[in-house]
Amino acid sequence: MSQYNKAELRKLVDGELEWSRVQEIMKAPKDDDRFEKWVALRQDEVAWDERILMPLTFKLYIVQKGRERIVKCECGHEYGDYRVNWKVYANIFVRDSVEDLHEVYRGREQPDSTWQQVREYYCPGCDTQLEVEAVPRGCPPDFNLLPDLDTFYRDWLGKPLDEEMEFVDKTQEVIDSWK
Amino acid sequence: MSAGAVAEKPRSPLKDRVAENERLLKETGSMFGLTEMRRKAEDPGKYESVWHILLNGMDAAWDVGCKVSASPVAAEGGDAVWSVHVPTGESVCSSKGIISHPGLLSQLIRSYIDNDYEINPGFKPGDIFENNDPHFGGIHSVDFQTLIPVFHDGELICWVSSVSHVMDGGMILPGSIGFMNPDAFADGVPFVMERIGENYQIYPWYEKRIQCRTRMPDWVMGDARGRLAGCFTVREKVLALVEKYSVDYMNDVMPEYVEDGRRYAQVRMKTQSVPGRIRKSNFKDLAMKGKRVIKPEQGIDCYMNVPMEVTVDKDAKIKFNMRGASGWVPFGENITPAAVISGLMNGYSHMVGFDMFNWGAVAAWELDSPPDGSWANPYPDNYFASSGVAWAPAIIWLSSLYETLGRLFYSRGFIEEVAAGGATTMTGEFAGVNQQGVYVAGMTLEQACNGSPARGMADGENSAWSIYVPNADFGNAEVNELYYPILYLGRNIEPDSGGYGRFRGGLGHTVVWMVQNTPGIEYACGDAGIRSKVLGNHGMFGAYPSCPDRPSYASGTNVKELIEKRLPLVHERGDPEDPTLVRNIKADVVETSVIAPFVTPSELHDYDLIVHPISGAQSVGDPLDRDPADVKKDLDNNWTRARVALDVNGVAADYDEKSREWTIDEARTESRRAEIRGARRVRGVPFKDWWKAERERVEAKENMDEAVLRMWRQSMKLSPGYGAELREFWKLADDFTF
């Protein structure tokens, strides 16, 4: 079984490992402690103290906050229950006109704004562009990843979390509460 | 037997074995009930050696078959594949080449068994079977599938199969990318689960059918002989293995390789991913209004909903769902569930089950039946829906597979396995008289070499990847110039063709062709998986997707004069708002941003130019987080433009004419990035506020093309649950439709 120390994984994450070494890692059997080391590396990167349960993106994490599990940005901004699509708590800017699209896509590279919107999701805390969707009007935002945390920790890692929670998409409950 | 009595229908032993295998898989969770792999356990070295001998044999067959064919797509492009299968059809081992097919070939063999072909006509040594029909395990008519049964001492020990993509399949229009086919009756010469030869010889009537129903019969027959030559090569290799290791060993070990494939795929997911649910929307345009079409009802724009939902359960078993897929289209872009499975087996091998590429991985996941009447399952509603280029929507769907699996791997920490999303597949086909005075109809393989997706910690590779073939290769320009009346004026990496992100997608390239030495030739810019009106929905972690596929051409040009005067020509696309074609060339007709696919309205002639773009792949991460040192490298290599560096990556740089190098201005970069972030803060609104205004616009169908509306109507009708969720999200009335 492969094993990589934290320093080498740090270099891998930062894109500083030689490509030949990255290929060796890709071709070798997978290290069975990667998740623990990965979370530890990411925990080192953030200034806040909540325990990271699972990294979601370059900037977003699922963390344990008291008895809740929430999505939190590297900058500290908090989004709410991880079973709610964090996008509904983000800031959004939609490019659906020629003028707005022109900033990014010009001339023959520009999509047709009557066929598609380009939705940019920003963190209200740090203005990082967290996700971009290119979808037609009417498309609800994708809930990209809803992990089954309890199954993962209990059955896959053998380290159950303190309090189990129902594995369910709660996004519509939030939408329903909006007038 | 008394008069009037009905004879009992003979049973097919293979059919019984299939049923038994299904029972064993269900009960034990292992292919063929192989909870233990005896041969692997007793001698793992021999097990591995035999696998590699078999694999080398498959690749030898590919070499032989492609070269015997002599058709450019096979000989130069390698667009073919050979596989060996256990008697019940599951593929064991395949060659390089178009590995999107072994899944179909496995299901084709199953079709033969399910239809009692073992009884009538029976299977015997020397038989040659062929199919190209999607109703029974084909994909589209130009992909000819050949099967031969292999016997040892009277016992069927395996099947050998092959597919090659022929240059012309006798479709309604010349060539092999039948996006324009209105229905199955336009889909070309059919071979429907037939025996096409016995005693190791093709029947004479097979060649006659090819001769009178395809435009390039020499190449098509060459392909048939090539497939057969490759099949015989595999047969020899397998029988040599039987000779050396015994038939008992081979009969045991081949099913073990399949089970090994299943275990590998399952363990990979258990090790590398997390359980849960992923949703990935994607859409694909097929805009044909106002273009040259065949039937009046084809004068429409289509927008295809290409959705993917993936669930990973507690046992790392994967389930794929296509709820929301929109309806079949009156073009050659419909596909069957069997072909989707085969495409998925291919895509899965890129990301997961790639150690022993075989049917085993298929047992590690399930595909819910796509909605009846959708582009992915048209026959319940339209048995004659065309599949002229069935891969087109599937390629777009498989691109989502990269990103969905990439997100799972990212969360688990395997960032080196992340891949952002695929490139597109746009073909260039020609039909007309070439420089030797010979009529040709066929394509180059320019599309078989895209940029590769960005990784979780690195850019993708430029011009190094193809979604449908592991050995990405666009063939030699000089060889293409021998077949077609074209000369290459350029084949250059295209700046900014891999989207924008912290890590960018590998770049694509641009090929510029000058038509030469022909009385006239048609250029078909074909859709084998493209987006021309829209971007892909691939903004993973904040990236911008790569731009749409838009070719250009100029007809009736002054290029001859420019050559004589040694003035600049065209070697690239150039600025998207000021293309080189317009800057440098005068012509009767200049089209600089054509919505593909299309066939040129009239033939092209000498000195006409085509600028054919090949896409890059997708990026990952906020472009403002791209390391300025990487932006400098891109600028120095002409892989990005200064405008993009400044306005998208927020990197300010200055060019030194003397050293011919860019230098990053760190202070201006910091301030530019702060400026862009500030602009986001000003223009971004809370999602809830946007939702409130947007739901009214959705309800009013504001600024929505008819193609978009029709797509939503179809998706919501074919998948009522999907429709209900959409209405619920926007708080639309229960009976609301678009």
Image (cartoon, coloured by chain):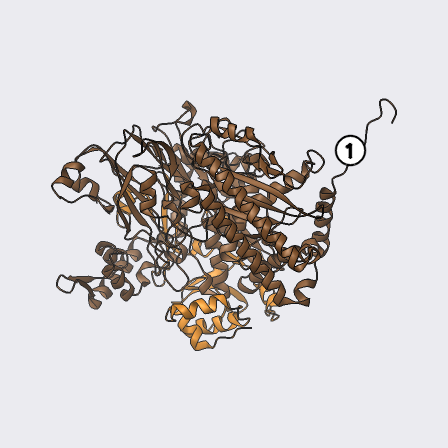
Chain colours: A orange, B brown
Q: Quadrant of the N terminus of chain B?
A: top right
Question: Residue B547's spot in the image, x, y percent?
Answer: 33, 47
Q: Quadrant of residue B694?
A: top left
Which residue is found at the position 51% from the left and 70% from the top?
A34
- Residue nearest the observer in this picture, B266 or B490: B490
Task: Specify the amino acid type for callout 1.
Answer: Lys
Vertical placement of B495 versus B69: above or below?
Answer: below
Q: Does residue B184 show up?
A: no
Q: Horizontally, is B620 left or right of B271 in the view?
A: left
Determine the chain carrying the residue at label 1. B
Say what secondary structure mark 1 lies in.
loop
**Above or below B738: residue A66:** below
Give neighbour class at mark 1: few <14, some 14-19, many 20+ (Cα, 10 Å): few
Left or right side of B562 for B499: right
Q: Give the residue pinned by disc 1.
A: B9
Q: Residue at x 84, y 22 (%)?
A: B4
As drawn, is B32 to the left or to the right of A124?
A: right
* Horizontal and vertical percent position of residue A47: 40, 73
Give coordinates of residue B284: x percent, y percent.
42, 41
Rendered image quadrant of residue A110: top left
